[in-house]
Amino acid sequence: MNKEQGRLKGKVAIITGAASGIGKGTALLFAEEGAKLVLVDRDSERLQTTAAEIRQAGGACETVLGDVSLPETADLAVCTALDAFGGVDVLFNNAGIMPVGDIVDYPLSTWDEVMNVNVRSMFLLSKRAIPEMLKRGGGSIVNTSSVMASLTEPGYSAYTASKAAIIGLTKEIAVSYAEKGIRCNAIAPGWVETDMNVKLAESVGGMDKLYPVIKQQQPLGRMATPREVGYAVLFLASDEASAVTGSCLSVDGAASAAI
Ligand SMILES: NC(=O)c1ccc[n+]([C@@H]2O[C@H](COP(=O)([O-])OP(=O)(O)OC[C@H]3O[C@@H](n4cnc5c(N)ncnc54)[C@H](O)[C@@H]3O)[C@@H](O)[C@H]2O)c1
């Protein structure tokens, strides 16, 4: 770790879903690259574990416990960034859920929950963070979409709709704020080694059952690690991506290139 020369040196970043998976992997990487972090999640215990790992490695972070689909959480996250670190430069909207089921049996309440956690949260956090980014002369928003925004399979009505909506929201923010110095991009991961897929494996009879599907769908032949996804987020968050906005970067081991 070299915080003096880090790719995010001096930047303040808010990361949602930071207690686990892609959010945690990205948080650890951002801290190594010199960012000061506000970590947001609803899982108190694992959020504190992530924070402890970052502090132990010499990084700076604050935690915000809350449901990202609520405006109070967006407000608290931004206020924490302002109070602790003086502003906001990067927003990684990443928290998401993936309940699966046939559309005919799919409860309306679950549909609403998926839309609220996966999409409304990004609207709320962007809405609250953009004015603060403008005060600093710009910023970078990265939203976690999915390969499933464009390729899907039965049972994913809400998830696929939510991930496609995220790409639309990303483009709108990008065109609205490009001239004002705020960039907004999405990432579209394929299979990633996280709890989300551990839960999916449990529902289909174990990882042994899931792995052949992963190998068949993702030419890379394995899941990506959270850290590998984190490097894509790091690029988009950093000044190296100063001309990249309104894009969606696939991090899917060629899943979206395969037939
Ligand atoms: N794992 C994959 O293969 C994969 C692929 C493509 C996209 N994604 C997306 O990546 C993102 C991160 O998922 P992951 O795989 O790291 O999953 P994960 O389950 O390991 O982590 C998700 C985190 O989000 C938090 N979270 C969920 N709902 C929340 C809420 N309402 N308020 C606050 N925190 C909440 C959870 O507590 C958890 O810590 C999601 O948006 C997911 O859709 C994952």
Image (cartoon, helix red, strand yellow):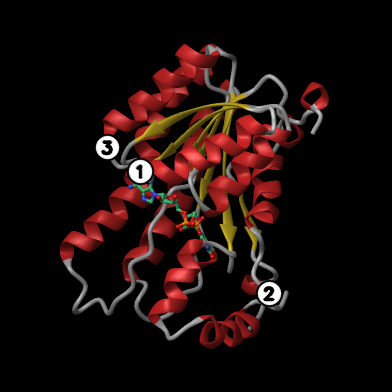
Taking the image as four quarters, which one is ligand 1 found in? bottom left
x then y, percent, for residue 31 = 66, 33
Residue linked to disc 3: 70
Residue linked to disc 1: 42
Report the amino acid beneath label 3.
Leu
Report the amino acid beneath label 2.
Arg
x then y, percent, for residue 50 = 54, 41
Is residue 76 among the parts visible in the rendering?
yes
Q: Which of marks 2 and 3 is nearer the N terminus?
A: 3
Q: Of helix, strand and loop, which one carries label 1?
A: loop
Which of the pair 132/97 is nearer the observer? 97
Residue linked to disc 2: 222
Gap between marks 1 and 3 measured at Cα: 11 Å
Q: In this view, does 5 lie to the left or right of 63?
A: right
Quarter of the figure with residue 214: bottom right
Q: Badge 2, how many Cα within 10 Å: few under 14, some, many 20+?
A: some
Is residue 245 among the parts visible in the rendering?
no
**Residue located 73% across and 32% down the image:** 33
